[in-house]
């Protein structure tokens, strides 16, 4: 009952959640009409649009809105372990992501069957990779939402991604051999959401052991970001005042 | 503190509670001491009014009891369990000053949501929802989305949420905000019934007249300190005494009374503050002893507003 209500809340908390899902599907359709993708173009678009951007939008203000409205003050006085609040909400996001990506995958499959456009090789792997990536981003964004008010988690994360990528490009262009650059790039590769690894996994470039390692690494990162969020939530003080 | 006897267990027990707000950015110099060495106890079946001027620390104390913030120093137990523990929270009902809900949810869905968070079964939630709907006159809007709610409806729903688990301790922050006169009377009756059933209730409110109708126990906070607590501030004990004299009122006042107790003095009238109504016979007898000829004695007991103003004026 508790789990059901908290999971349901992640979908029902705002009308924009439904609008986001529908508009994402519309964008997939638009991409298909405009670009008529072949090979892995469609899957890669699903991976970026559904696996990276969707979790940021869906987790917008997932805790921050409650903090800003003062609603969190009533929630944290309930006899709940703070982790429960966090885990069920993240599970809600993860289930939304799974459902969304499966539907999108079915769409790609149907379009390919009827038109022959695109490629459905490794489609299930692309959907799985997108979902794993979705979970990592969702955990990161949800944890950030425990710290910042309103919907700033999404904005901060987007700014951080852009800044880090620009920095990475500059470093690899101007100081490619430096130790600092190597450490920074390694940190980005292993501690950040594993965009590169999962896309290789989806393309089928990894052996079974490497694939298992990649999935484990992604799950560990998701858990790590989640634990940070749970610790912050249990240590955070909430002053009950409305913005 | 561990209590073995349930009857003796306090609903709230604070010992040397201090809360200092520190800003991470501004450092130690900007630390604000919101509460200083607060020690108090609230028993089961007691209604306590938390009063004080703005910035006195009422919300901080309420937030500490609710487990929303940590004390910097001191010990705080709720029904014998450390504040913020799951056991302490399971017996706690909290209503904030500005209730906020998911606007897409109906009142019924919100009650179901909070009931689920409390770990209640579907049946128990349904029973509690029906009970709250009746008690708080929510029949008209129970199935309407919260976005349509007036302030009064929001207050009723917030109170219904706070009562979902039949709490042993109920914390209410300005509960009568936005309620119509009928709603206020219903709220008062409900709180009295809850008190009679053993629920401890702590109410923070600026509506002193409303508080007075509910309780005679107050905690007066001023600049983070408890100025007065419990019996020492029982309304009706202190008072204002107006004595009409034939003559020489000012001389009598100088001989007998401390200047801080005298509100108004003239040759024919003395208007004085008394700490205890039991002192009236002694004051009158002393006046007679020094030769005063008294025309009339009029005793006005202090209402809570007078008490508030007196305590406030004593400190400013």
Image: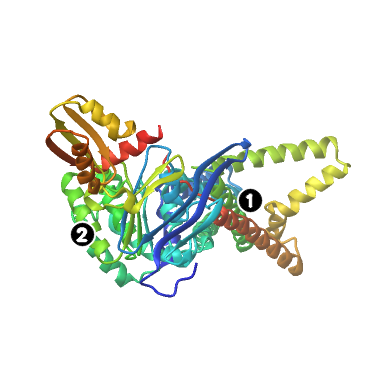
Looking at the figure, which quarter contains the C terminus of chain A? top left
Chain bearing tag 2 is B
- Using the image as rendered, state which of residue B278 and residue B3 is in the foreground: B278
Write down the quadrant of residue B263 in the picture: top left
Locate residue B214 relative to residue A124 in the image: left or right: left
- Asked if badges 1 and 2 are on one and the same chain, I answer no
Q: List x then y, in percent, for residue A6.
A: 44, 60
Locate residue B187 relative to residue B97 in the image: left or right: left
Q: Is residue B35 above or below residue B160?
A: above
Locate residue B268 relative to residue B129 in the image: left or right: left
Secondary structure at badge 1 equals helix
* Between marks 1 and 2 in the image, the one whose residue lies nearer the viewer: 2
Report which residue position mark 1 lands on.
Answer: A44
Q: List x then y, in percent, for residue A15.
A: 39, 47
Locate residue B177 relative to residue B29 in the image: left or right: left
* Residue beneath the point at 29% across and 57% down: B160
Report which residue position mark 2 lands on.
Answer: B135
Secondary structure at badge 2 equals helix
Q: List x then y, in percent, for residue A7.
A: 45, 61
Mark 1 and mark 2: Cα distance apart in space: 57 Å
- Using the image as rendered, state which of residue B274 and residue A105 is in the foreground: B274
């Amino acid at each position: 009952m508790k789990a059901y209500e908290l999971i349901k809340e992640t979908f029902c908390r705002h009308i924009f959640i439904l609008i986001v899902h529908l508009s994402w599907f519309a964008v997939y359709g638009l991409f298909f009409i405009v670009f008529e993708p072949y090979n892995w173009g469609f899957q890669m678009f699903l991976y970026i649009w559904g696996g990276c951007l969707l979790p940021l939008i869906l987790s917008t203000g997932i805790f921050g809105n409650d903090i800003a409205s003062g609603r969190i003050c009533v929630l944290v006085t309930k006899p709940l372990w703070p982790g429960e609040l966090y885990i069920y909400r993240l599970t809600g996001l993860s289930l939304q992501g799974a459902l969304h990506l499966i539907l999108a995958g079915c769409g790609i499959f149907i379009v390919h069957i009827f038109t022959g456009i695109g490629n459905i090789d490794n489609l299930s792997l692309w959907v799985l990779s997108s979902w794993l990536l979705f979970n990592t981003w969702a955990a990161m964004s949800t944890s950030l939402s425990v710290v910042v008010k309103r919907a700033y988690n999404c904005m901060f994360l987007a700014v951080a991604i852009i800044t880090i990528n620009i920095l990475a490009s500059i470093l690899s262009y101007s100081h490619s051999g430096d130790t600092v650059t190597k450490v920074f790039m390694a940190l980005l590769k292993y501690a950040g959401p594993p965009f590169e690894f999962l896309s290789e996994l989806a393309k089928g470039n990894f052996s079974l052991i490497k694939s298992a390692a990649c999935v484990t690494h992604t799950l560990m990162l998701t858990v790590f970001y989640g634990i940070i969020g749970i610790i912050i939530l249990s240590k955070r003080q909430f002053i009950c005042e409305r913005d | 503190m561990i209590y073995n006897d349930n009857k003796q267990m306090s609903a709230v027990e604070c010992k040397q509670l201090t809360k200092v707000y520190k800003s991470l950015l501004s450092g130690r110099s900007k630390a604000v001491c919101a509460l200083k060495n607060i020690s108090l106890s609230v028993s089961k079946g007691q209604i306590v009014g938390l009063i004080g001027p703005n910035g006195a620390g009422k919300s901080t104390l309420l937030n500490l009891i609710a487990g929303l913030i940590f004390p910097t120093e001191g010990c705080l137990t709720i029904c014998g369990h450390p504040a913020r523990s799951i056991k302490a929270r399971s017996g706690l009902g909290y209503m904030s000053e500005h209730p906020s809900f998911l606007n897409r949810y109906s009142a019924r869905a919100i009650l179901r949501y909070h009931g689920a968070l409390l770990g209640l079964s579907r049946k128990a939630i349904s029973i509690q929802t029906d009970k709250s709907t009746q008690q708080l006159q929510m029949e008209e809007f129970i199935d309407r989305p919260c976005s349509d709610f007036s302030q009064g409806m929001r207050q009723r729903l917030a109170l219904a949420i706070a009562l979902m688990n039949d709490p042993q301790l109920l914390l209410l922050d300005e509960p009568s905000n936005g309620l119509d006169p009928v709603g206020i009377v219903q709220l008062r009756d409900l709180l009295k019934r809850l008190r009679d059933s053993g629920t401890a209730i702590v109410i923070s409110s600026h509506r002193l007249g409303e508080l007075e109708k509910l309780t005679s126990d107050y905690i007066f906070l001023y600049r983070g300190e408890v100025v007065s607590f419990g019996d020492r501030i029982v309304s009706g004990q202190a008072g204002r005494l107006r004595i009409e004299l034939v003559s020489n009122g000012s001389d009598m006042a100088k001989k007998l009374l401390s200047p801080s107790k005298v509100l108004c003095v003239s040759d024919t009238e003395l208007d004085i503050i008394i700490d205890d109504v039991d002192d009236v016979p002694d004051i009158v007898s002393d006046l007679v002893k020094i030769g005063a000829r008294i025309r009339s004695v009029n005793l006005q007991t202090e209402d809570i507003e007078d008490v508030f103003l007196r305590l406030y004026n004593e400190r400013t």
